[in-house]
Structures are given as C-alpha cells and as structure tokens.
Image (tube, grey):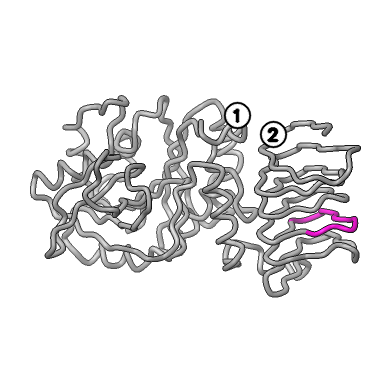
Amino acid sequence: MKKGIILHGGYGTRLRPLTYSRPKQLLPIANIPMSQFGLVEMKNAGITDIAIIIGGENSFKVREFYGTGEKFGVNITYVNQEKPLGISHAISLCQEFICNDKFVVFLGDNILLKEINGFVDEFEKTDDDAKILLCEVSNPQQFGIADISKNGKILKIMEKPKNPPTNLAVIGIYFFNPKIFKIIKKLKPSWRNELEITDALQLMLDNNEKISYETITNYWKDTGTVEDILDANKKLLEIFDLSILDQNNSKVQMKRKLIIGENSIIEKEVKIIEPVIVGHNSNISGTITIGPNVSIGNNCKINECSIENSIIMDNCEIDCKIILKDSIIAYDSKIKSNDDEKFLKLLVGEQSKLML
C-alpha cells in the first residue's frame, strides 16, 4: 500500500473564530498542525503518495504549508472538493489518483496515538475489502457507530443514531480497496445532503463485502471543538512524540517534558510547570507561571501573563497581568491590559487586538 488520502475540507464552524482565516486541520496542537500527525503516520507506514482533499476559501493555506510534500518526504496531490458533500464524496474524487491500489483514508482533524503501520500491513495481507477502527466513546450519539454481534461480527454501521446500540465509534481512519468507488456511486445523499461514509460501509455489508475491524484502546480524538483541541494538546504534551519535531536541531532544548525552541528565552523568574512546549524565537518574562499543558508558538512575547492549559499560536504578544486558563489565542494576536491580575478564559481569532 503506497497511497493515502487526507481529508482537509469542511467549514469548522464549531471552532470559530479560529477557523475564519484558516482550515481547522492546520490549527496547531503541541505546535504541530493537526493534519500533519496523519501525514507522518502515513509516511511511517510506507505510504508516500498522498492526496489531500481541500476546499473553501482558505484552502490555499494548505498548499502553502505542505507544498509538494518534499520537505515531509512524501509526494502530495491536491484534489479540490468545491462543497463539503461528505467523506464518501471526497473519496470518490480520488478514484483516478488511487487507480487499482489499496489505500488508507485519514480525516485531517483526527488524532490517534497509535502507529497505523500494523493495520496497513494486516490489510495488505488479507482479501478484505475494507478495514475500520473502533473506539469506545461516552457520547455515541455524536459519531458513526458499529453494532457488533456476540461472536464479533459487524451487524450494522449507522451515522449518529438517536439510540445507539453500542458505544463503539467508527474513528476517522479507514482502509479500502478500489471496490469502494463502485459502492459510493450507488449512494444517495443523507438528510444533510452528504454522501456518508457510514452509508458506504453499510452498503458494503449489505453486499456481503468483507469488512474487518479492530477495537483500539489508545487515545483518539476527533477535534471538533475547542475542548477537544485543548484535551488533545494536553495528551500530546504528556507523551511528547518527538518524531515530528526537529530532533536534529542541537539548539532545541529538551528536558523531561519541557521543550524550548531555538533562540527562545525564558527569564529566570518564570516558573514552569511541565509539560510545556515553546517554539523558536520566543521570549517569556515576568514573575509568572507557565503550565501545565501549555503550547506557545514561534516568535511570541509573553510578559507578566501566567498561562495554564492553553495554546498560544505563532507571533502573539501578551503583555498584561492576567492568568489565562483553558484558552486559545490564534496567530498574530496582541493582548494588553492595565488591570490587576484576574483569571480569564479566552478564544481569540487570528490577528486580533485586545485591550482588556
């Protein structure tokens, strides 16, 4: 298996104002754009020909970041989905790219803390037509759900059922052979005018196609909300998967669960509670506390502002005596205040200027 698809479309309405100016899959978690985790997993599994499905007015930023894929060790083909008409529709646009190969599909806003190379190898060796991954969730009404018999057979796959028969969510990583394209052509749009991937999987079951599955217990998150992003940031900082970071840069300081980028300065009066990551060329000063679970991007200036369980993206300036908690501050934003110290929870869009 040498080919993969990453879905990078959708409007990301639940994440506004963060997604007014860029696709949600480019929002950073632990200073890494979330879709990059899927791309790296594919590359590590030997998948180097990757189609990225893009759409929307800010899709050019995906091209700007990933380019040809050369700097990531892969070859990228861009496929445009003019309207968000569903996962199955997006996959159908890649039929010419896939040709007759087996392939993997990775939703760009999904974070899975487990390597997929084992799943890829297993799927390659079988005559299965599809393979899905399942994960127990506490809110199954929000996901595609699989109903499994007592002897382990998939009985039914359904999208966001009101009365789910199980709590086994179908996560956003799928393995297919080219039969899926014929299946998709038979689908009808759902009530939300999308070609649902769960409908395609169910039709495969109805046609007696072979679908295997594995239930995972590793951390998985569909990062559809601010709370999801902060939770994923916390988890990734806890494990510090350095395979994606620049490990060969000797100027990057790594100590236990603290990473400080090149040319970044943390003044001695700053108290750090790990885990924390700070990007390149950033400066943090004041009698303050940073952490735990804090990601600070490149070229940031933080003065007199304590930060906990938050994400500060590149090129931000925060100069005020406040305590930020459970917050996300998007790129190129500036926050100032003349008030005394107070707790704040902020969600700030890109290029914002706040005087508190």
Whichever of callouts 2 and 1 sits on the residue coming sooner in the sequence is 1
User: Does 16 sit above or below residue 298?
Assistant: above
Asked if residue 186 lies left or right of residue 198, the reply is left
Amino acid on which the number 2 mark rests in the picture: Glu
Whole-percent x and y of residue 261? 76, 61
Asked if residue 85 lies left or right of residue 355, the reply is left
Amino acid on which the number 1 mark rests in the picture: Tyr
Which image quarter: residue 182?
top left
Q: Nearer the viewer, residue 49 or 223?
A: 223
Residue 276 — which label? none
Which image quarter: residue 235?
bottom right
What residue appears at the point 80 percent right and 53 percent down from the top-left corner? 306
Q: CA distance from mark 2 to mark 1?
A: 8 Å
**Kind of element beneath mark 1:** loop
Q: Is there CB contact under 8 Å for labels 2 and 1?
A: yes
What residue appears at the point 22 percent right and 38 percent down from the top-left corner? 199
Whole-percent x and y of residue 37? 51, 55
Task: Point out the stretch of residues depicted in magenta.
Answer: 279-289
Which residue is tagged 2? 350
Residue 20 — which label? 1
Magenta segment main secondary structure:
loop
What residue appears at the point 43 percent right and 57 percent down from the top-left corner? 220
